[in-house]
Image (cartoon, rainbow, N blue to C red):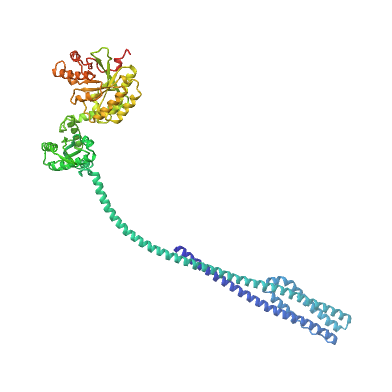
Amino acid sequence: MLELKSKIYLLLISSFILLFVSLAYSVKNISSNTKIISEIENKYLNLSKNIQKLNLNIEEKQSNVLQSILLGKKPQKNHTHLEAIVDDIYEMIKFDLRLKNLLQDKLLVLKKRLVSYKSVEVSVIESLNSKYKEDLEDAIIGYNEVTKGFTEDVSEVEQTIRSIIKNTIVELRESNSLSQMMVITSFLITLIIVIFSVLKLNSLQNNLSKELKRSSEAEEKQKNLQEQLLKYNENLENEITKKTNELYQKVYTHFLSGLPNRNKLLEDFQIYDFSMVALLDIDKFQKFNDVYGEEMGNLALQETAKFIEDFIDIEGANIYHVSGDEFVVAVQENTNIDKDRFLHSINHFINIYKKNIFDIGEHRHSFVMSAGISFYGAKKMLAFADMALKDAKNRNQHVSVFSESKEIEKRHKDDIECKNLLLEAFKNDGIISYFQPISPIQDPSLETKYESLVRIKKGEDIITPHTFIDVAKQNKVYYKLTRKVFQNTLATIKKYKIPCSLNISVVDIENERTVENIYEMIDNFNYNNLLTIEILETEEFKDYDVVYKFCRKIRSYGIKIALDDFGSGYSNFTHILNLPIDFIKIDSSLISNIDRDKQSQIMVETIVGLAQKINVKTIAEYVSSKEILDTVKKLKVDYAQGFYVGKPEDISKYCFNL
């Protein structure tokens, strides 16, 4: 805006300078032209007077000469006025070059006329003195002609001068008019520029006022905004502090118990040197969660966290809630507690926790806790404690200590290697089935059956399931094993048209994905009558109704059902009566020494008697000798299975003739 204002002022100054210059020039031009016009007019008047006077003098002179002739007097010679007229004409034309150029010849003629006039006048006077009449007449005639020519030349000069002067005066007056127009135009232009500049300056002034007002308002607004910003910053800082605390709580505190969580424990491992760590876990807590719901489970965890805080009697102990039902007790170095005291305190806590009754909702519950303890390992101490906890659960103990012999660590490494072996086998089609014969021992007309047993083939090595079944369950890929064994078994039945059986665990039956896969595979299978599904009775049935519905569904496809490992720890005779089964496989614990154990014989005899009454066939497992075979045959067992009857082999070994 300041730059625009400066330009307007510069425009005003320029317009005024232009006006003054044009006025000065015009005034000077008009004044000069007026002066010239006045001089020309004066000179022209003098010239006109002189010409008129010349004409009168010529006439008078001619009259005097003629009068003198008539009177017989001698005329006087006086040519001064004629020369004056010529001088006036010269003076008249000096100011204008055009006059000088146009009248130069005329003046020469006038001078010649003047000379002729003088000469003729002398001739007249001489003719008058000579008394010759003829000469006098000729002289008078010549005198008249000269006088007349002189008068005409003077008149012609006068006309020329008058015309040129008139044109010159007209041009000068036009020049004056043009100068006046220039002045008027300059004045108007200047006036317009002034008006424009005034309006523009007024507009600029208004805009400046508005800008100043807006600037003032903006400054006031900015001041208010700054105040608001300062207030907002203050609120933001408070909010950030609050959110930081909340974030810290979320990141480093377990949302249920309020105890430091796994993130805090891992960070503390980087800061502090822990010398003792105990990892506590509530046994079978998932079952409690499934039965009573997550809300009750959360209440149980909160009560457990309070109980741990109240009853862990270890000086300088840090307590963490690292996952759903897992807690950690960690002790830093340079404390007054030793390993024995720490181990004793953990055992004591587990005992009082087991005896405590928790009021949760409308019910009273008690829980059992296991612990894995590690006294070394630095940054791996928590991992070692976790290995010890798994070892405690596997051995059905409440406390296990990670030993420096690293046996537990070796078992975990073996599990990891086994997991990798499983994944590689799934990828490279290394899951195969071996088949063990189940031979009839009472009725030779019955067909030999074959049980499909899972194996892993790695190169030339055949790996038995006891090394990888538990690992498959722990890593949630057990369902893949079941599906592959099913595919292998159905393919064998289809190829060799022989009856085969395979094992299905309760874990499989309770897995909806596995069950759906089974139904899909057998839905369009044309040899379901040759298939038997063995349900492992050694596992506890969590939902008896699910198992019953599965058996009914399988039977609807024409598939037979066998109850496997009957007579082991979880055996229940109601299964025989309530489930729609076709075979009972008597567990190896009753068969392995039946030829020497009377109690086993009584038990097997009872099972066989009950089976015969409900029209169910029996199969003796683990028949490893002729003595055992003879004994079970004597006890009326229908089928025998074991190494004495036939080892698990590739099916081609048994069906080479088919």
In the image, residue 156 above or below residue 550: below
| Residue pictured at 65% horizontal, 77% vertical | 38
16 to the left or right of 653? right
Q: Which corner quadrant holds the C terminus?
A: top left
101 to the left or right of 570? right
Any part of residue 76 in sight: yes
User: What x and y, as percent, mark residue 159?
Assistant: 74, 74
67 to the left or right of 518? right
In the image, residue 367 above or below residue 179: above
Residue 166 found in image quarter: bottom right
User: What x and y, as percent, mark residue 348?
Assistant: 11, 37
26 to the left or right of 628? right
Residue 596 found in image quarter: top left
User: What x and y, as percent, mark residue 591?
Assistant: 18, 18
In the image, residue 472 above or below residue 318: above
Query: Viewer-proximal residue, 382 or 562?
Result: 562
Query: Viewer-proximal residue, 578 or 79?
Result: 578
Residue 610 found in image quarter: top left
Any part of residue 417 in sight: no
User: What x and y, as percent, mark residue 362?
Assistant: 18, 41
Query: Viewer-proximal residue, 385 or 658?
Result: 658
Image mark count: 0
Q: Which corner quadrant holds the N terminus?
A: bottom left
Query: Viewer-proximal residue, 113 or 417?
Result: 417
